[in-house]
Image (tube, rainbow, N blue to C red):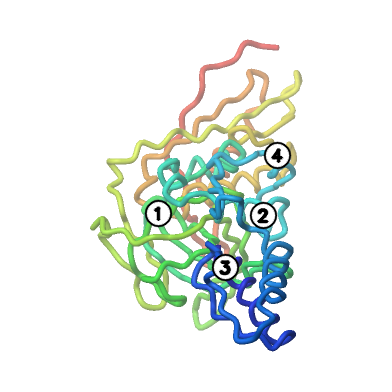
Amino acid sequence: MRNCKVQIEKCRLRIERQTDLRLFPIPNLHFSICTLQFTSSRRVVGLLLLMALITTEVGCENRSGKSPPVSLPVAVDKSLLKGVEDKIEAVDAPGYYALLDHAGAVSATDLEKAGVKVAYVDLMAHPEQFRGDPITIQGVLWRLYELPGGRDRELKTLYEAWIVTGDSQPYRVVFSRLMPEFVPGQKLRTVQVTGYFFLLERNETSEERWIEDLLYVSPIIVVAPTLLAQRITSSSDPIIKTSFETGGLEPPVLLEAKDINLPDIKVGLHSDKDGTLARLMLGGNNLGNDDDAFERLNEEILQIIGRPGNPLVKDLAVEIDADFECQYKYVAKAIVSCSGRFHPQTGRTVRYIEKFKFALPHNPK
């Protein structure tokens, strides 16, 4: 509707320049001859010109004088997301702008009603199951930035929020509508958002640490769930129990560990008849069968738990499901990969998972 008014005002100014007629601004889109007042005798010409310009350039009114309501369903066409892969930049993935436009066009109220809460570990372990679904998260706003809307796009400015929930590393949220209570650069307030889960986005940063007067810079790869939304809103729920410390990120604990019932992490080892590893599986993801597969398993486990020592996942367990013929050395490698990582600079092992269980044995092949 606003675009229509802008076009009509342009029409009015063009007629005044071309015909020396003066037309009073039209306050709304319900036109009648009495709304036009001319200062010359060429009122008929002016009226015809204005009607022609409105008809050809605006074209937004039906015969009743009212624009038909546009209502998009909340459910997204999953074919838009065909070919989306995780661990890349979201803007490079197919369907990014299509899903972002859909999120901006649906009713914000309907979208928020349709949102469901999904555990962070489930998103990290099985992203393909939730791609394109509306997800609701509540947490602390860590960062809020402006983003360019993209070349040749009607929305020239988008917004990027990083939100930390109690069971996660930050979520990245890209949205199109900034509510009046928010200002870019703002942080440390409780917010809620419902957006479409798009992918697990790869972000690279670094960590600096002094050890015996030597500065070590370690590259850190963070994989964050990315949601595409219309808006973020303030939350008055007093759930924050800790806050951020100056100079670093201390994720706030929004929930007690006893309130979270996390599913076991499923690690499968499938072998040939001679016991050679054929596939190392994390949930439904095939990590391969070489030494790099166990390195990938280690990285995936870290992404699932969020950070070493996370109190919310201290009771999380890994279930090892190995074929009857699988050589034990592969089982041992899987346990070591899930347990943590040896840090060569400190000489210590950083613990990830401490609890393991084994699935019921399979019949021999």
Comparing marks 4 and 3, which lies closer to the viewer? 3
User: Alpha-carbon neighbours of circle 3 within 10 Å: few (<14), some, or many (≥20)?
Assistant: few
**Is residue 47 found left or right of 305 in the rendered image?**
right
User: Alpha-carbon neighbours of circle 2 within 10 Å: few (<14), some, or many (≥20)?
Assistant: some
- Kindly indicate the quadrant of the structure image that contains residue 267: top right
The residue that label 4 is drawn on is 79
Query: Compared to 98, does 242 lie above or below?
Result: below
The residue that label 1 is drawn on is 309
Residue at 65 percent of width and 43 percent of height: 294
Residue 299 appears in the picture as rendered: no
Q: Which mark is residue 96?
A: 2
Residue 51 appears in the picture as rendered: yes
- Label 3 is placed on what type of residue? Ile
- Label 2 is placed on what type of residue? Tyr
- Kindly indicate the quadrant of the structure image that contains residue 11: bottom right
Residue at 59 percent of width and 74 percent of height: 217
Q: Earlier in the sequence, mark 3 or mark 2?
A: 3
- Label 1 is placed on what type of residue? Gly
Q: Secondary structure at mark 2?
A: helix
Circles 4 and 2: CB atoms closer than 8 Å: no
